[in-house]
Image (cartoon, grey):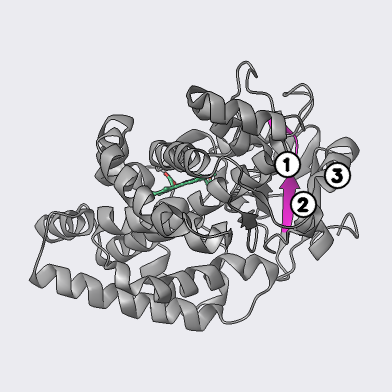
Amino acid sequence: MTSPTLFTQEFWNDPHPVYAALRQEAPVHPVTLPNGMEIWLVTRYTDCKAALADPRLSKRQGAGDNARTLASPVRSPLTHHLLAADPPDHTRLRKLVSKVFTARRVEELRPRIGELSAALIEPLRGKDGADLIEEYAVHLPIQVICELLGVPIEDQADFRHWTSVMVSASAGGPGVPEAAAAFVGYLLGLIERKRATPSGDLLSALIATRDEGDRLSEDELTSMAFLLLLAGHETTVNLIGNGMYTLMTLPDAHRRLREDPSLIPAAVEEFLRLESPVETATSRTAMEPVTYGGVTIPAGAMVAVSLLSADRDAERFPSPGEFDLNRPDNQHLAFGFGVHYCLGAPLARLEAQIAFTDLLAAFPNIRLAVPPADVMWRPGTLIRGTVALPVLLQ
Ligand code: HEM
């Protein structure tokens, strides 16, 4: 490990100074993750962008960061997805779902997302305080992705538990094989039920694609459902949470957005850049030696790209720690880059824009109920988000 300050609770609470030191020290660092995995961490914007688009870095071998801990009956149905595939398999899989997530198709969901957001805000109106994560931010993305996929919302307690165990695996958390096995059993049951009674949702459409030809295998079907359900809700919750946290520490920006909601889309891009909900992109494997910034990563090594670090690189973003609504050319890497660029980016942006608009309109005085430094952040290298976000609403 390069620095003793990595991967402690202090680091999770404020990783930015550590990343700044790492960027300064060297472009790439070999580190040991809390789960024991050895990985080369890329920290500077230019190198991160190059690595994300580098065809010499394969996704196939990594097959998801949890894969190595799973037995094969569980591994196979969870790891044949977009983030564990290289072209041409990746291209084929992505084509099957890309139409549903275009900006135009997603825009059609605006009224429904607005209804869901309004229904979540209603019970908060009379309250003095709330945990914004548990009482709002978690629910909007989860309800949207459940409706899109055709997953019963009543089952959310189960799959939220399984996914949260699985995404905190990088912090060395326990229970991954059990959670993965339960998730696979759930998905197989759901697919069986939908096969018997299809409806107009995405999962039914994917099942039909699977059954009509050879464009999708059974493992690819369950893996796709798994990835969409996981990526659809573990990320956007933290864009809403991290964004509200940032805003509540910046009274001037808070006021400007309240007075002029047309600034919200630009604010969402700054929230994405400043506190990227995906801290580190999913791991890749070097298929041959690769050199970034003069440092050579050997063939066979695992590579992690720190999106959070890249987006605070002063070489790319002047005054990188500052929230700037007029930042020109805000090409942050929060949604990744290259062929694996986030499929759900238009949906995440729309959900976040609706969430910030509605929350600021309903609660103009919303503020943190604790000092900012007392807010605890989740451990783990994949997801950056607060454990809870206690706020005063009135
Ligand atoms: C603020 C919210 C979100 C953020 C920050 C985010 C971030 C990312 C990032 C960084 C990647 C690339 C990972 C890599 O290259 O290793 C990615 C890929 C992906 N995201 Fe998102 N995501 C968000 C929301 C969503 C939503 C709502 C969906 C739901 C449909 C989604 C579905 C996906 C999928 C399927 C991929 C894999 C794409 C591929 O490999 O071709 N994401 N996301």
The region drawn magenta spans: 39-45
Task: Tell me: 56 left or right of 78.
Answer: right
Which label belongs to residue 296? none
Which label belongs to residue 17? 3
Q: Residues within 10 Å of mark 3 (few under 14, many from 20)?
A: few
Question: Is 103 in the magenta?
Answer: no
User: Between 5 and 215, which is closer to the camera in this rendering?
Assistant: 5
Which label belongs to residue 249? 1
Question: Which residue is found at the position 88% from the left and 54% from the top?
Answer: 2
Q: Can residue 158 be seen in this view?
A: yes
Q: Quadrant of residue 223?
A: bottom left
Q: Which amino acid does label 3 sit on?
A: Pro
Instruction: For mark 1, give the secondary structure.
Output: loop
Viewer-side label of 3, 2: 2
Task: Tell me: 175 left or right of 85.
Answer: right
Instruction: For mark 3, give the secondary structure.
Output: helix
Which residue is identified by label 2? Answer: 372
Q: Where does the image place residue 13, in percent across and percent down from the top left? A: 77, 56
Q: Which amino acid does label 1 sit on?
A: Thr
User: Between 14 and 316, which is closer to the camera in this rendering?
Assistant: 14
Question: Which residue is found at the position 40% from the left and 81% from the top?
Answer: 182
Q: Where does the image place residue 206, in percent across and percent down from the top left? A: 20, 55
Q: How far apart are marks 1 and 3 (CA)?
A: 18 Å
Q: Are marks 1 and 2 in contact (CB under 8 Å)?
A: yes
Q: How far apart are marks 3 and 2 (CA)?
A: 16 Å
Q: Where does the image place residue 334, in percent across and percent down from the top left? A: 58, 39
